[in-house]
Image (cartoon, coloured by chain):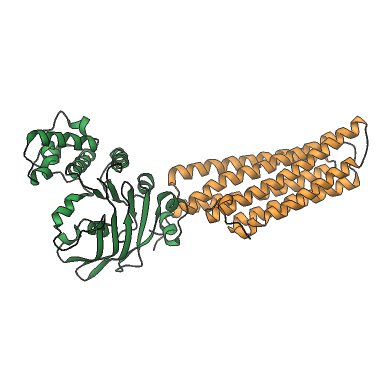
């Protein structure tokens, strides 16, 4: 259920602009890896190369290789949609399908995959909502619109939707930045549970959040405006936040620049 | 690139300066307390006791502000290590102040009998050694200088030798009358206080090394 991602010398462009340069990073299964760094450092772009979301943007391209347990996700004949199912993603703003019920939101991915049996769908809906820590709050109103939930609940609904299709990896791009503090802490607790089953990668602007939830932290930085983002330092989270090796990491996490 | 936590780092700088000030107060106490003892000056004893209250108040103020910064700023890396080290360092300095109060109070117990010349000379040297070690430790803290901090254990050997010399001087009196023995015990305790002060300076230096390098002493590569 949980696989290793290896990014090797990944660079990414938007048209002529190089956003990410030469990132090599191994992301271990059953761990939470946090990507931190200032705005524009390429961390969100990089995470989108890990499930082929980057190429969805017109004019965007990448170089380098990304493998999932040694399987090249950019290999010939590999279907991008299949990759995105295997490597799920949760975005900054909760984006449930607005006209769909809570149940249908969670079941949407399965239905796309051709699952029609009601009992199977109900089972997966319950399991996914439980996995996202939302079941008790919504079990009596599964037929109501997902858009009627609070922001924090909507984000957990999106997590339920992502895990319903049983991915190997969950990518989270600033999953709490639009949420209130209590919802944020609920999602953080959830992330700690999710890592038992999935490889979790989280992009966050909140360093304390990275310190709280992750096992490994990778610091991205850019040398200046218009320069591509690079990976500066990666290490186990306690080390990064107590005695980072690179002075640029130190300067960033202590707020001496940002 | 812009400095993003200016207010926090200004407050951190103030704390660092106050720790150095605390060290200066303790150094003053070492000299004032020892002078009170060597000169059998009971009035000076009261001044040393009063000065220690100032030292205690500054210690508590630094401690409270450190907790506040931790709670409000969630410090990381060197900032986190600095604040944790400050909490340890001020405790060591505050203990030095307390020990000097003990030294000063011994003046009352020894009064009015003068100290033996040899004992007197040794206590004066122990005072100098304690002050030198505290000064070196505080300098290492102020300058973030792990090399200076590393010199403290060797300096401490000097203090240990002085303590042994003091004990020998005490035993050399060969007296068996109770009053002399009581005075000898007081002098031995004073020697012990100086030796403890020097140990506190070594502890400060250890914390400085951790603060700068992020490594605890047992993690450091062994020389040779």
| In this rendering, position of residue A97 left or right of residue B41 | left
Query: Is A153 or B1 nearer to us in this picture?
Result: A153
Q: Look at 67% across and 49% down and name the residue there.
A: B201
Could you tell me if residue A256 is visible in this image?
Answer: no
User: Which residue in the rendered view is the most extreme toward the top?
Assistant: A140
User: Residue A107: x, y in percent?
Assistant: 12, 40
- Which chain, by letter, is green? A
User: Residue B139: x, y in percent?
Assistant: 64, 56
User: Residue B105: x, y in percent?
Assistant: 78, 36
Identify the image quadrant of the C terminus of chain B.
bottom right
Quarter of image, res A143: top left
Q: Look at 59% across and 51% down and name the residue there.
A: B217
User: Residue A109: x, y in percent?
Assistant: 12, 45
| In this rendering, position of residue A147 left or right of residue B184 | left
- Which chain, by letter, is orange? B
Quarter of image, res B37: top right
Q: How many marks?
A: 0
User: Which residue in the rendered view is the most extreme toward the bottom?
Assistant: A16
Query: Is B155 or A92 nearer to us in this picture?
Result: B155
Q: Is residue B83 above or below residue B144?
A: above
Query: Is A132 or B34 nearer to us in this picture?
Result: A132
Query: Is A60 or A116 nearer to us in this picture?
Result: A116
Q: Look at 17% across and 30% down and name the residue there.
A: A139
């Amino acid at each position: 259920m949980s696989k290793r991602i290896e990014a090797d010398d990944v660079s990414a462009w938007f048209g002529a602009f190089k956003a990410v340069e030469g990132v090599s990073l191994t992301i271990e299964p059953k761990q939470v890896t946090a990507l931190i760094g200032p705005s524009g450092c390429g961390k969100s772009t990089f995470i989108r190369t890990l499930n082929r979301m980057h190429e969805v943007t017109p004019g965007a391209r990448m170089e380098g290789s990304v493998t999932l347990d040694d399987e090249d996700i950019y290999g010939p004949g590999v279907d991008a949609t299949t990759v995105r199912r295997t490597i799920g993603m949760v975005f900054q703003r909760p984006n449930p399908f607005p006209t769909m019920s809570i149940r249908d939101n969670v079941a949407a991915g399965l239905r796309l995959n051709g699952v029609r049996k009601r009992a199977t769908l109900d089972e997966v809906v319950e399991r996914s909502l439980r996995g996202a820590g939302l079941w008790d709050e919504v079990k009596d109103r599964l037929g109501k619109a997902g858009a009627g939930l609070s922001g924090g609940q909507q984000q957990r609904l999106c997590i339920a939707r992502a895990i319903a299709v049983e991915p190997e990896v969950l990518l989270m791009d600033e999953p709490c930045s639009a949420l209130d503090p209590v919802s944020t802490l609920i999602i953080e607790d959830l992330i700690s549970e999710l890592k038992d089953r999935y490889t979790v990668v989280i992009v966050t602007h909140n360093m304390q959040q990275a310190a709280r939830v992750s096992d490994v932290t990778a610091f991205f930085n850019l040398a200046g405006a218009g320069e591509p983002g690079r990976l500066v330092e990666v290490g186990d989270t306690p080390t990064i936040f107590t005695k980072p090796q690179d002075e640029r990491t130190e300067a960033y996490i202590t707020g001496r620049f940002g | 690139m812009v400095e993003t936590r200016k207010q926090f780092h200004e407050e951190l700088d103030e704390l660092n300066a106050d720790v150095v000030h605390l060290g200066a107060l303790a150094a003053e106490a070492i000299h004032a307390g020892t002078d009170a003892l060597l000169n059998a000056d009971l009035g000076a004893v009261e001044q040393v006791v009063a000065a220690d209250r100032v030292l205690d108040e500054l210690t508590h103020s630094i401690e409270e502000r450190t907790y506040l910064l931790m709670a409000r700023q969630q410090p990381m890396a060197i900032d986190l290590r600095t604040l944790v080290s400050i909490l340890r360092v001020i405790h060591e300095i505050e203990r030095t102040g307390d020990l000097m109060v003990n030294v000063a109070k011994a003046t009352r117990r020894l009064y009015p009998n003068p100290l033996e010349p040899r004992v007197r000379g040794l206590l004066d040297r122990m005072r100098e050694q304690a002050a030198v070690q505290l000064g070196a430790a505080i300098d290492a803290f102020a300058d973030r200088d792990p090399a200076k901090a590393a010199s403290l254990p060797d300096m401490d050997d000097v203090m240990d030798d002085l303590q042994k010399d003091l004990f020998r001087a005490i035993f050399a009196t060969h007296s068996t009358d109770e009053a002399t023995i009581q005075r000898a015990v007081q002098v031995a305790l004073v020697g012990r206080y100086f030796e403890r002060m020097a140990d506190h300076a070594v502890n400060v230096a250890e914390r400085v090394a951790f603060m700068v390098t992020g490594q605890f002493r047992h993690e450091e590569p062994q020389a040779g």
